[in-house]
Image: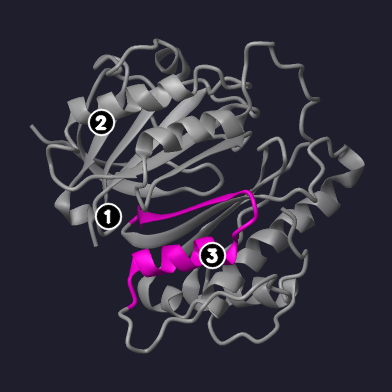
Amino acid sequence: MVITRAICMAASAVLCVTVAGCSGPSVVSSSAPSSATAPNRSAPSPSSSFNCTAALVLAQVRQLFAGQDFEAHYLTIADKLTLSVWLVDPEIDPATTPSGMAQADRRAVERGLSISYQMVEQIPCVGRVFDQVNPMIVDGRFQHWYKDFLPVRAFEGLHNPTTDDLIAAIQATGAALQEPRDTPPPAAQTPPASSCGWSVAQAGVHAYFGAADNSAAYLIIGARLLEQGIAIPITPNDAGVEVQWTVRDGTEASDPQVRERLGHVAEALTCLWPAADSLEAFVVDTAGRTVVYAIVPASVIRTRTIPLPAGGVRIYHMTPAARP
């Protein structure tokens, strides 16, 4: 029997996707200008002879932010084709004290709105292809500061906007900005000698994915992932890894194949410090439509088995109605 229900699967915003039939037991689950008015480089505008495609936009986004620590990918979220960019802002102090929170929060929002505006303003195809942009801003220790889902139309037709102009334009669409971080980051801990940082783990994940155009892997610490109706204890400083890869047919999206790939991803995370508390996977087709969503709790990430055990991974298959 197929059961259709909505689950929430975002950190700072409620993202509901319609899913059908789930398998597994009930477990849970660079420096850049601070002003939104000063893009740091130009991206090539597509020729009028080019067809606007998500793949073309992604290539231009990667050129736009080249040299910065970022990940970019696209997928459907709540039936909206979404352009997501995770970006490290080195100007946000990972050890911000309570007295500096307001300034750091403002910086994070400015940076998130700035990169969103840059993509829409400098890459005309963004407005023709995507419904929304998803900026994710973290500091140099990959701690969450700002994550949002913003309608592309809010940024269209603006000229040299200030941050306040961007906020007003977003609110004029009826959208509300998500609040940035509300607590100071915890003190840094000394990592074990045998551990690795995110750059090493991320490189391992991408080495496994190969040259896939629309793959991604990033770490967000302290984004307060929702429990999604499955019993996983979530604490304010949990380390959440998110990955995405593309499949070309139903066989590649089957539960055994998804658990196989997740096993290899988890293997790349075994040395990570801080250790991952959860692993989320977004499996998309060649058009970027989300076909599978999976979540792996910490205990299963560290089983070091390939494929991951069927009893430990929660897998959701999207219904056709959930696809645009």
Mark identifier at residue 63: 3
Asked whether, in this view, residue 116 is left or right of residue 124, the answer is: right
Describe the element under mark 1 as helix, strand or loop: loop
Camera-side residue of 78 and 263: 263
Span shown in magenta: 52-78
Camera-side residue of 115 and 229: 115
In the image, is residue 31 part of the stretch drawn in magenta?
Answer: no
Residue that badge 2 annotates: 258
Mark identifier at residue 289: 1
Task: Tell me which corner region of the image, top left, top right, bottom left or bottom right, holds residue 34.
Answer: bottom right
Look at the numbered discs 1 and 3 and tell me whether their residues touch, using CB distance below 8 Å: no
Q: Where residue 169 appears, x then y in whole percent?
A: 61, 77
Marks 1/3: CA distance? 23 Å
Q: Is residue 79 above or below residue 43?
A: above
Q: Is residue 189 above or below residue 92?
A: above
Q: Where residue 244 appears, x then y in whole percent?
A: 38, 42
Marks 3/2: CA distance? 30 Å
